[in-house]
Amino acid sequence: MSGQPSERIDLLVHGGDVLTVDEAGTVVQDGAVAVRDGEIVAVGPAAELTTRFTAAESLDATDCLVLPGLVNTHTHLAMTLLRGRADDVTLQGFLERVLKWEAQLLAPKNVAAAVRVAVAESVRAGVTSALDMYWFHEAAEQAAREAGWRLHTGPTFMDVPEPPDGIAYEDRLEWARQDLAARGTPRPGHRPVLFAHSTYTLSPDQLVEIAALAREFGALLHIHAAENATEVATVEVRYGKRPVELLDSLGLLGPDLLLAHAVDLTGPEIAALARTGTSVAHCPVSNLKLGCGIAPVPRLLSAGVTVGLGTDGAVSSNTLDVLGAVRQAALVHKAGGDPTAVGAEQAVRMATVEGAKALGLGDRLGSLEAGKRADLIVLDLSAPHLRPRHDPWSTLAYAAHSADVRDTVVDGRVLMRNRTLTTLDEAAALADLEALV
């Protein structure tokens, strides 16, 4: 009613088209998103919401596209330290080099410096959260939290002779248990996470122990699996089963397990993933660059497997650009002759709501709907390569670049406004990283 005070909110993003990425694929033309306490309280026409709410802060998205923040479902953020140092090699050659350099370079201070640059790159690219498997996760978490960025991380298990953090495997379970116990109730839009590197760096008994710990705390368990044929053959010779077969035989497949890569899969393995509700993080750029092959994403999707998108680390993909992964995912699967194999809308969903589902956070992240956390981006549509605008899904998948992202919001906090970072000193972060390399 006229004359009554409007509701007070923290942020109103108004104008432009709002691509909600809800189940119906709703697009609100000249729309708005209202945010209070880090949560979306309303999505609708700008004319309606600007009357209903009084906002402490606003973003005018006129001539822009508003959409959910991008979700990176597999990465190693601190590998920005090594960007460009392991190019044009096989996966096994890549691992040999990286493990040697990690032993020389990794320490909490260095990881924090590398993660600050990774956060800056991600915020600029419209990536609002990432699942990060790496050493010294406490340093990474602190760096991300200082910037207000959503990082999903936790203890990593990899049975190597001299782990960079100096914690031998026999001590890691108790260390990880204490880490998870100290976290208490997860913050909104977060959940506990554990990382088991792979079936070739951990024994079956170790994998079972790690999975039991993850289930004890209701944590997501993330693991590399079936990244290339050599890995599969190595595991099969060692244990008599392929990686996914081994995980299935150990009872590890399930809705709380997320596989990275899943390139080399058989039909029965795809069926097992679908049967158990196991999700996959598809990393098309890294897989192509390392010559691993192309994950059977169309078959996974047809079977009902949840597939998100990841960049992998900046040393294997050279970039943390999830929007670039969207384009690659929408294109590479057409190489078999079917232009409908992965369409524009499907690729965008893999980078948003499907990625959130893969993390077990589909009820909190990935789409612009009331009740979800306010992770969103504003994409400037004024550039010539984005005109005319016939279809927002097509624009995002086939035409847009990460440089078109103008504003990035995480938990209702504006981390980038008009292409300027607001919570992180980018120049200082870059200087700190350069001093290390």
Image (tube, rainbow, N blue to C red):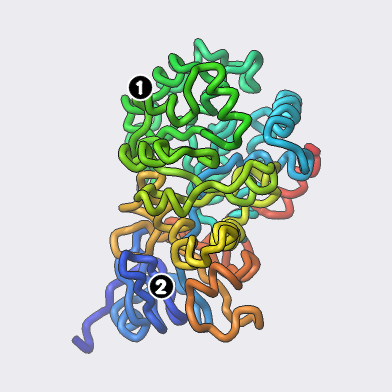
266 sits to left or right of 232: left
The answer to whether 96 is drawn above or below residue 388 in the figure is: above
Q: Amino acid at mark 1?
A: Ala
Q: Nearer the viewer, mark 2 or mark 1?
A: 1
Image mark count: 2
For the residue carrying disc 2, how many other residues have a C-alpha within 10 Å: few (<14), some (14-19), or many (20+)? many
Q: Secondary structure at mark 2?
A: strand
Q: CA distance from mark 2 to mark 1?
A: 43 Å
For the point 41% across and 41% down, which residue is it? Answer: 270
Q: Residue at x 52, y 67 (%)?
A: 339
Q: Earlier in the sequence, mark 2 or mark 1?
A: 2
Q: In the image, residue 67 lies at what x, y percent?
A: 45, 68
Q: Which residue is mark 2?
A: 12
Whether residue 268 is situated above or below residue 367 in the rendered picture: above
Instruction: Check residue 303 in the rendering and tell me which mark sits there, or answer none.
Output: none
Q: Is residue 16 above or below residue 106?
A: below
Picture residue at 31% right of the left edge, 64% below the top: 23
Give coordinates of residue 274: x percent, y percent: 34, 43
Please tell me in which quadrant of the rendered image residue 330 appears.
bottom right
As displayed, is residue 76 above or below residue 160?
below
Say what secondary structure mark 1 lies in: helix
Q: Report the residue marked by disc 1.
A: 212
Camera-side residue of 391 and 17: 391
Amino acid bearing label 2: Leu
- Please identify the quadrant where the N terminus is shown: bottom left
Q: In percent of the image, x 44 and y 50: which residue is there?
A: 299
Q: Residue furthest bottom?
A: 2
Q: Residues within 10 Å of mark 1 (few under 14, many from 20)?
A: some
Q: Does residue 116 appear in this view?
A: yes
